[in-house]
Image (cartoon, grey):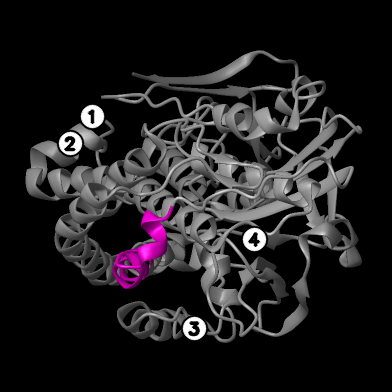
């Protein structure tokens, strides 16, 4: 009797989603899918809004990564104004984006993923959560909270508040960093760096326990895409797009954001509200590619800071060409935290950060603009079309999680085919491995809703006639 396993909701991610696993009559996995079940409609209801409002509006897409949308939107506005923003504004935007990378990656590692890594995927759900982490290792939990706080404080010092700062605008930014704010960042940097290094060493020490997961959690050939600087080094807010294959070969390079439609197609699956972008020259679905920390480290030649470059070289030894295991997204995030902290150390004494020459004023000089920036979860594109008054006629957003959609589905199938066999009950730990495969990507489903304590889970195995053959409930 054919069966279908449903995990609804997927826990410890930002937003609402479910996983379905389809079995044949013998209990073998036919397919597995990740479904995003929420719909927000930002692209449509932005139509008719003034260009100048777009950064503030689109920042409301998410409470975890509002800075990412704020900056990509402002960059699209820069293109429509046809201006080069002042150097101080560019450096300040970069500082805020580095802070965003720190706070988001810290949340992902310490609070969403470390319970699995420290307690194991088969640990009881009542323990395998952030409260279990606090009870077991309060110092680690506290340090994780303070590292995320460090990133959020920089965002607040620049934008006036930690969440949804309406600070970046087409043409620049609204305000500089204060001298008091600069001093505060300098004081907090040593502790942040120490915590990031400790977390990285902790993860590397645990890797030996997770050899199976490293091989099975989304370990397959694909393309990778990210921004790079002109010299091929790590980039997070400038540069051009680059694609590499699983052997590490560059297949497309220095692509201006305005040309993204030549390389990125967008497909829609009826089973999810999340779009499925693909590498257009290879077609759909063969053009599967990944974005985010794993992609950024695969795509770049170097990071440009001493500790992060040393760690990058060690990281790359985990692959022949590109590092293809999605389980190692966790590893890449921790290296990026260090890269962000080292970059802030390098730039924090730049007098431009205190400058008041922050904005290029201009009218509507183009009717179309594309802004691209690296969000914590991957490359983010905002594409706007406006009329002569600057009113939005059309908006298209290609979000990081969407670009990983094909890869997440393939990851679900890979994990399910290995762990789920036969028609008997599926152990809770096996279901958690499916969820953990998704958490490796740290998807953000534009909602930033988090459950606390014991996570709810409802799994039904349905017979072909729709009747419930087996039911599991927790929480």
Residue 349 on the magenta segment: yes
Could you say which is closer to the camera, residue 121 or residue 227? 227
For label 2, the residue is 132
For label 4, the residue is 290
Q: Which mark is residue 302?
A: 3
Query: Is tag 4's residue or tag 3's residue first in the polypeptide sequence?
Result: 4
Query: Is tag 1's residue or tag 2's residue first in the polypeptide sequence?
Result: 1
Could you say which is closer to the camera, residue 25 or residue 327? 327
User: From the image, which quarter does the C terminus lie in?
Assistant: top left
Any part of residue 3 in sight: no
Q: Position of residue 459 (x, y in %)?
A: 51, 24
Q: Which mark is residue 180?
A: none
What is the spatial separation of the Cα atoms under label 2 and label 4, in whole angstroms? 32 Å
Query: Is tag 4's residue or tag 1's residue first in the polypeptide sequence?
Result: 1
- Picture quadrant where residue 145 is located: top left
Residue at 58% x, 19% y: name it.
469
- Are discs 1 and 2 less than 8 Å apart at CB? yes
Please indicate whether residue 115 sits to the left or right of residue 266 in the image.
left
- Are discs 2 and 3 less than 8 Å apart at CB? no
Instruction: Choose mark 2 or mark 3, whichever is in front.
Output: 3
Q: Secondary structure at mark 3?
A: loop
For label 1, the residue is 126
**Is 383 placed above or below 94 here?**
above
Instruction: Choose mark 1 or mark 2, whichever is in front.
Output: 2
What residue span does the magenta drawing correspond to? Answer: 340-355
């Amino acid at each position: 009797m054919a069966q279908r396993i449903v995990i609804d909701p997927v826990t410890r991610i930002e937003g609402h989603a479910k996983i379905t696993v389809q079995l044949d009559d013998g209990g073998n996995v036919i397919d597995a899918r990740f479904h995003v079940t929420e719909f927000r409609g930002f692209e449509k209801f932005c139509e008719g809004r003034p260009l100048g409002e777009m950064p503030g509006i689109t920042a409301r897409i998410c409470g975890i990564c509002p800075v990412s949308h704020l900056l990509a939107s402002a960059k699209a506005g820069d293109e429509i104004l046809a201006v080069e923003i002042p150097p101080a504004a560019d450096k300040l935007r970069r500082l805020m984006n580095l802070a965003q990378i720190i706070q988001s990656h810290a949340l992902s590692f310490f609070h969403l993923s470390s319970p699995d890594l420290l307690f194991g995927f088969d640990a009881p759900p009542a323990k395998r959560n952030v409260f279990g982490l606090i009870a077991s290792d309060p110092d680690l939990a506290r340090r994780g909270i303070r590292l995320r706080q460090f990133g959020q404080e920089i965002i607040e010092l620049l934008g006036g508040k930690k969440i949804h700062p309406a600070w970046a605008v087409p043409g620049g930014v609204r305000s500089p960093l204060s001298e008091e704010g600069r001093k505060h960042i300098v004081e907090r940097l040593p502790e942040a760096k120490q915590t990031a290094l400790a977390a990285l060493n902790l993860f590397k020490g645990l890797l030996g326990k997770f050899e199976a997961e490293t091989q099975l959690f989304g370990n397959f050939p694909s393309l990778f895409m990210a921004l790079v600087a002109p010299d091929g080094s790590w980039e997070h807010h400038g540069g051009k797009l680059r694609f590499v294959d699983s052997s590490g070969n560059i297949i497309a390079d220095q692509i201006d954001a305005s040309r993204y439609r030549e390389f990125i197609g967008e497909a829609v699956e009826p089973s999810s509200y999340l779009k499925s972008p693909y590498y257009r020259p290879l077609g759909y679905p063969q053009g599967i590619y990944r974005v985010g920390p794993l992609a950024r480290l695969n795509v770049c030649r170097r990071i440009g800071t001493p500790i992060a470059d040393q760690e990058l070289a060690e990281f790359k030894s985990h692959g022949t060409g590109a590092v293809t295991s999605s389980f190692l997204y966790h590893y890449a995030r921790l290296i990026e935290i260090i890269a962000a902290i080292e970059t802030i150390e390098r730039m924090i004494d730049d007098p431009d950060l205190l400058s008041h020459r922050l904005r290029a004023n201009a009218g509507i000089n183009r009717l179309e603009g594309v802004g691209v920036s690296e969000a914590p979860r991957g490359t983010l594109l905002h594409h706007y079309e406006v009329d002569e008054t600057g009113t939005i006629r059309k908006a298209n957003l290609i979000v990081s999680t969407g670009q990983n959609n094909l890869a997440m589905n393939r990851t679900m199938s890979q994990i399910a085919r290995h762990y789920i066999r036969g028609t008997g009950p599926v152990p809770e730990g096996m279901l958690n491995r499916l969820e953990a495969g998704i958490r490796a990507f740290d998807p953000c489903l534009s909602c930033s809703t988090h459950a606390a304590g014991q996570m709810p889970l409802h799994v039904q195995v349905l017979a072909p006639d729709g009747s419930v053959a087996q039911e599991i409930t927790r929480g």
